[in-house]
Image: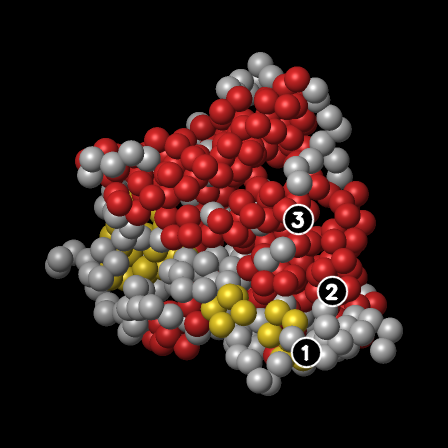
Amino acid sequence: MPNKLSWALPFSLYTPGLMDDPYRPYAALRDAPPVFWSDEAQSWIVHRYADAMTVLADRSFRVTELGRLVGDLSRRGGKQADTLEALLSVFLPFVNPPDHTASRRYLRAVLTARSVASYADDIRGIADDLLAAAPAQGGFDGATQFADLLPPLFMGRFLGLLGQMVVDFILGAAEMGKAFDRGCSPRYYARMNELISDMRRPFQQAVDERRREPRDDGLSRMMALAGPDHPLSDSALADHAMFITMAGSENTSALIGNAIAAVVEAGVDGDALAADEGFAEAAVAEALRFDGPVQQFWRFATRDMTLQGARIAAGERLLLLVGAANRDPQTFADPDSFNPRRANLRSIGLGAGMHYCLGAELASLEARICLQAIAARRPSFDPAHPRQWRDRQTLRRLAKLPLQLRQKDA
């Protein structure tokens, strides 16, 4: 490929366990060209903050429409994945305009039917209930007993669904997250199709119930706001409810866990966090930069262009290494240190451009309240048990976060 500015990645993107500690490999990229071709990934690698922001802001770069891709691969492989295809087709991070524009406008109206701040008491109540069950001496898993549970429990309250039903759905759908990584087979998609078909039934039943008897809840608002401007069948409403539940749970859970781990490891003053909302908000913003959940974004070019000397042809893909960009020393001073008091708290932790996270304000509120609730109990790592990370390519999320907590008033 003589026309390509090639450079060999110093690590494999597909190495199991890469997300256990991706930042040391990312640091090796600081000597690389700002945009270079990777034979392994068959894509252009973008790893600096300013360049990643340029790509995300440029609407001539598009996302791969995952629903369509899964459907095509499954049909070619002789497998059935129609329910999975329909669900993925409403996942906004994998939808392009004009469908993306209409769906985003609709879901934004659903989320802002009430002010985000009005949910604070609900979130705080869930956090306190979960922490009330923490044992007095160690033995508390900040991931499985807190971060993994609060967002789906809140989404249950938001939509008017039973909390345990939503938790079971999120836990059961965890394996589906691998569909967002590369290299999945038609057999995997067929298995996920069967799983999602089963998990979809309670959502469809809830839509049927609201059709007969509307309530004052998020699901009823979804149905009312669909209307003539965004006509949706009841099955499509169930898919949108599943999407908003998953979108409001998985990445937020990852953010909460990563933020807790970051403040504990950095020795941030827990009393200051618990007492000062502004400081806690800054800690969340810094966590999104320092150790954000989403580590990679894929895009493809719709036109020939040049970026940092790299000649990118229409149809070629770009891999944006968000975790590396958020620690770019050209943008962030001392990028490998967690510092909520730094002057520059911006990041790509929640995306940018037209795919900026739809629920960013809500996710940040949940993380801030969770961080304050945990900080009030002066957390420390449990020395007898190490942290563990989920084995994923795209999402950096804790599987285990063993903590020792003090009683709130101790």
- Say if 231 sits above or below 373 in the image: above
**Mark 3 → mark 2, Cα distance in angstroms:** 15 Å
Query: Disc 1 marks which amino acid?
Result: Gly
Q: Nearer the viewer, residue 136 or 320?
A: 136
The residue that mark 2 highlights is: 133
Of the numbered discs 1 and 2, the one sitting upstream in the chain is 2
Where in the figure is residue 231, as x and y percent of width and height?
A: 53, 18
Snapshot quadrant of residue 324: bottom left
The disc placed on residue 99 is none
Left or right: where 374 falls relative to 252: right
Q: How is the image coloured?
A: secondary structure
Residue at 30 percent across and 47 percent down: it is 188
- Say if 380 sits above or below 226 in the image: below
Most extreme residue toward the top is: 228
Left or right: where 96 falls relative to 290: left
**Mark 3 → mark 1, Cα distance in angstroms:** 24 Å
Q: Secondary structure at mark 2?
A: loop
Most extreme residue toward the right is: 409
In this view, the mark in front (3 or 1): 1
Query: Is the N terminus in the top left, top right, bottom left or bottom right quadrant?
Result: bottom left
The disc placed on residue 138 is 1
Of the numbered discs 3 and 1, the one sitting upstream in the chain is 1
The residue that mark 3 highlights is: 153
Instruction: Report whether residue 338 is seen.
Output: no
Query: Disc 3 marks which amino acid?
Result: Leu
Query: Is the C terminus in the top left, top right, bottom left or bottom right quadrant?
Result: bottom right
Q: Secondary structure at mark 3?
A: helix
Query: Disc 2 marks which amino acid?
Result: Ala
Q: Nearer the viewer, residue 388 or 103?
A: 388
**Mark 1 → mark 2, Cα distance in angstroms:** 12 Å
